[in-house]
Image (spheres, rainbow, N blue to C red):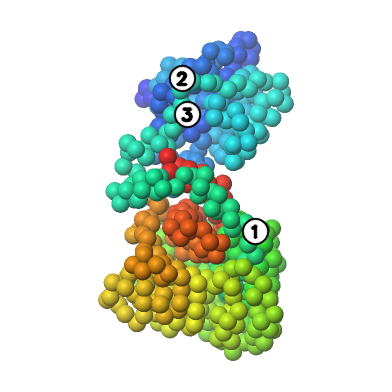
Amino acid sequence: MQKYVDGIGVALEIEEVDALRARYRDQGKIVVHCHGVFDLVHLGHLRHLDQAKQEGDVLFVSITEDKFVNKGPHRPVFGEQLRAEMLLGLGVVDHVVISRAPSGFDVIERLKPDVYVKGEEYEASEDDITQNINKEVSAVESYGGKVVFTHDVTFSSSQLLNLNFDIFPPETTQYLNRLRDIYSAEKIFDSLAQVKDLKVAVLGDAIIDKYTFVTPMGKSAKGSFITVKRHYSEEQAGGAIAVANHVGQFVSDVTLITGLGGDPKYGDNYENFVRGKLADTVTPEFFHMADNPTLVKERFIDPEMNKLFEVYIIEDGLLRRDWHDTAAVEWLRDNIADYDVVIVPDYGNGFITDSMVDVICDKSKFLAVNTQMNSGNQGYHAITRYSRADFVALNEPELRLGCHDPLSPIDELATAMAERLGTKFLSVTQGPKGVMTVNHELADRQTVVPALATKVVDRIGAGDAFLSLAAVCHGAGVDPELASFLGSVSAALDVQIVGNSEPIDPIALHKYVVSLLK
């Protein structure tokens, strides 16, 4: 039977449907199944569910678990139990099940409904970018079930939420309203498709990000330090590897140029690990640096994803800057001009030498650069080591360091730095304030994209995600405002990911853009 707590209906777990399905089968009842997010139940949902119930005797509705609601960082607005309660308040719904997966496929396999019902918007399966509907239909038909599509008035939950709920701050809402008036989702995706056939090189430090998850136990009784209980560690491919993987989700030909440890005395240089983490579209070009290890950064994280402290596992805090870079310089001289776009996430850890910078600046067709400020280089690693760039992405402290100016307005500093480097576009990422981009080719032209994420899991890598997509868009000649917007969407998705555990998913980006523009 349906579970209730204090008179309120509670969603079932998938394992609980077995006994119910067996009972209804013994009773000869026809079981009907609908699946969706149902973030905001509206008239269109009610009519859809009414039509579904008419197909049988018992109506099961499965809802997507919160973490799989792939409509952007601000969704779902209502958590899974609240969504279940709303649906169970409708007399037409008999049971609600939580699907612990991105689609209804797992529930279908367990429930084996006689009839599976979807809305008419799914009838043209080629329009479903996830292709989940094809998988679901095949599952139903495999045991002789029937698939039915309802036809009635339709509404968009995303549109209703965007128009009637204060999901975003006023400045973000105003920005999205203006964007909707200028660009359709189709136009944005057509623009993004221009990057697919680019030939892209990503050049920068390889970093192994080690996340060690702990629970603080309090101050030590024998000293002034915090004691923690260790749970487990996981290693992720970060630095330029992560950037290459982001780019490789949207571009079919990406080369990663990076340095790995070149001395066995430092242990594993992580080459096999890195190769195993690369996207299929990414080809590595490794240079092994004598007298250097592969850089590992270990972060200790509490259960709320707060970073307690970080350890650089490396000799003297940095790579030796006098590593013999002759082979890398020669490779760049011979090959870098062949790439349509060269992206340089320069973390200042020592792989990129001054000689390499000279070749990159001289021979790159379109050069995108970020010089990251971090604990290992703070105070001396600045964008001014590059003599030119076509696109630059910096955060505010990185820009101020390059300008040696802590006080002047950011737009003035961005314009001045763009002029100094001959940069067409310079973006300044400002966290919760969003991103400002100056267009050096047009006088007094600047755009601001407000922050598009309403919640944050981990900020590590958000700047890399912005650089990755904005760089290839600018390199492909995409409208500059769309380049900043798509880079910002990428960053908004990235802050939902722990570190560099996975690259930006093009389907997630597609669905989030559609959600934002409704």
Disc 1 vs disc 3: Cβ atoms closer than 8 Å?
no
Residues under labels 2 and 3: Cα distance?
Answer: 21 Å
Residue identified by numbered label 2 = 47
Does any portion of residue 279 appear in the rendered image?
A: no
Disc 2: CA contacts within 10 A as few (<14), some (14-19) or many (>=20): some
Residue identified by numbered label 1 = 197
Q: Indicate which disc, 1 or 3, sits on the residue closer to the N terminus.
A: 3
x and y percentages locating residue 41 in the rendered image: 41, 28
Does any portion of residue 104 appear in the rendered image?
A: yes
Please name which of the two marks, 2 or 3, marks the residue nearer to the observer.
2
x and y percentages locating residue 36 in the rendered image: 51, 31
x and y percentages locating residue 275 in the rendered image: 69, 65
Residues under labels 1 and 3: Cα distance?
Answer: 46 Å
Q: Residue at x 60, y 11 (%)?
A: 29
- Closest to the observer: 256 or 476? 476
Residue identified by numbered label 3 = 11
Please name which of the two marks, 2 or 1, marks the residue nearer to the observer.
1
Please name which of the two marks, 1 or 3, marks the residue nearer to the observer.
1
Q: Indicate which disc, 2 or 3, sits on the residue closer to the N terminus.
A: 3
Q: Is residue 284 above or below residue 250?
A: below
Q: Residue at x 56, y 39 (%)?
A: 102
Q: In which quarter of the view is residue 447 placed?
A: bottom left
- Closest to the observer: 318 or 326? 326
Q: Residue at x 62, y 87 (%)?
A: 323
